[in-house]
Amino acid sequence: MDFRFTPAEEAWRQELRTFLRQELPRWYREEGDPEDWTVSEEAWEFSTRFVRKVGQKGWLAVAWPKEWGGQERSYIEQTIFAEEMAYHRAPLGRATMGTRIVGPTIIVHGTDEQKREHLPPIAAGEVVWCQGFSEPNSGSDLASLQTRAVPDGDDFVITGTKIWTSGAHKADFCLLAARTNPDAPKHRGISLFIVPMRAPGITVVPVIDMRDAHYFNQVFFDNVRVPRRNLIGQQDRGWYAIVTTLDFERSGVERSAEARRVLEELVEYARTTTRNGRSLSSDPVVRHKLADLAIETEVARMLAYRVASMQARGLIPNYESSMSKLFGSELSQRVATTGLELLGLAGVLVKGSKWAKLKGRLQWMWLESFANTIRAGTSEIQRNIIAVRGLGLPR
């Protein structure tokens, strides 16, 4: 096995870094965060401009065919793109739902009409998508969802509610899972739809998280009409498309890249900070903790590149994606917890506080890390998938 990148892949990485140095202003490189849009309208506008610049270069979906706005690059090059953007904290949040989850699902299961209509705007960064899967009583057991889609002529009429819908208040479209056959076994009566978020009957209610950020929402659907042509895949067979969607959602290299950036900042902090007359980095306990996290960060990176390698060979990752998601999301918790231990009481200060350390990012990261092991499938669900599908253990 060769872990080295090809000269072309290394050149691609350098091209991305040059672009980021040119396009991300100094103030953003020092102070910015990709999720600033959850607390600031100005940050949302900045993200919008940046995403469209990236989209104009055909980079948002670099592995897609050129006819859909991509560059037909390899999956490895697409992963390099995601890694560099995450490491440099590029504000791509408004685009990732479309490029990483919705677009690949439409490519695999969508009609030619759906591909022509939706893939180019996603690749150009012109539209924002959200994902309507979880419900108040259907989270980990997603197949128990109760939102209904009832056929009515050339339409489906959707009624129900979704929750934890990230970015729904900014979204143009929703990738929605709804029950179309209440009498079928729960995995066999579900369908997947493209729903315009401006459709009559949709109400979006903010859910403010413990960071005081508006990221999540609850969305109510009151007799919302959706054309039958917006059905993705076969009616009542949407669970198979959903599984594809979740595999794409769980396979990101971003987690390891974000952890590596924070870890590098913690190492520098330990090297330059003294307590009781000596640097933190001279404490063997601190050194061992940081060394362990460095190893774990590289493990998370390799798990993510394994997924990309499988995609490059025409395989659809399954339990391999769960391994990447599980390890990466729990790594973010360990990095954040270790960081707060190193920073002490100053580490819990919010961004903008006079005495906050490392721009207040550790407090933000620590609070967010709890959601990381829940959204896109809890750690318990990921372990079950790995056990059953990866190790062949009984249910």
Image (tube, grey):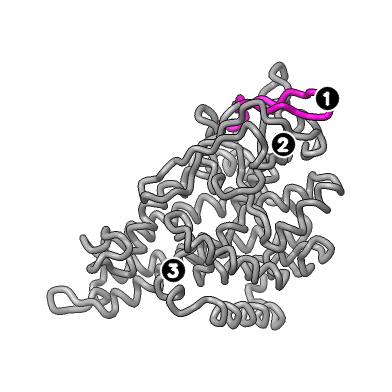
Please give the count of numbered marks on the rendered protein: 3
The stretch in magenta equals 140-159
Mark 2 closeness class: few <14, some 14–19, many ≥20 residues within 10 Å: many
Residue on which disc 3 sits: 32
> The residue tagged with tag 1: helix, strand or loop?
loop
The reply to whether dot 1 and dot 2 touch (C-beta < 8 Å) is no
- In three-dimensional space, the C-alpha distance between marks 3 and 1, rounded to whole angstroms, equals 49 Å
The residue drawn where x is 56% and y is 45% is 168
Residue on which disc 1 sits: 153
Magenta stretch: includes residue 393: no
Q: Position of residue 275 (x, y in %)?
A: 16, 73
Magenta stretch: includes residue 156: yes
Which residue lies most toward the top here? Answer: 183
Q: Nearer the viewer, mark 1 or mark 2?
A: 1
Mark 1 closeness class: few <14, some 14–19, many ≥20 residues within 10 Å: few
Vertical side of 57 occupied by 372: above or below: above
The image's mark for residue 192 is 2
> The residue tagged with tag 2: helix, strand or loop?
strand
- In three-dimensional space, the C-alpha distance between marks 1 and 2, rounded to whole angstroms, equals 18 Å
The residue drawn where x is 72% and y is 81% is 8
The amino acid on which the numbered mark 2 sits, given as a three-letter code, is Leu
Which image quarter: residue 76?
bottom right
The amino acid on which the numbered mark 3 sits, given as a three-letter code, is Gly
Image check: 158 left or right of 255?
Answer: right
Q: Position of residue 45 (x, y in %)?
A: 54, 63
Q: Earlier in the sequence, mark 3 or mark 2?
A: 3
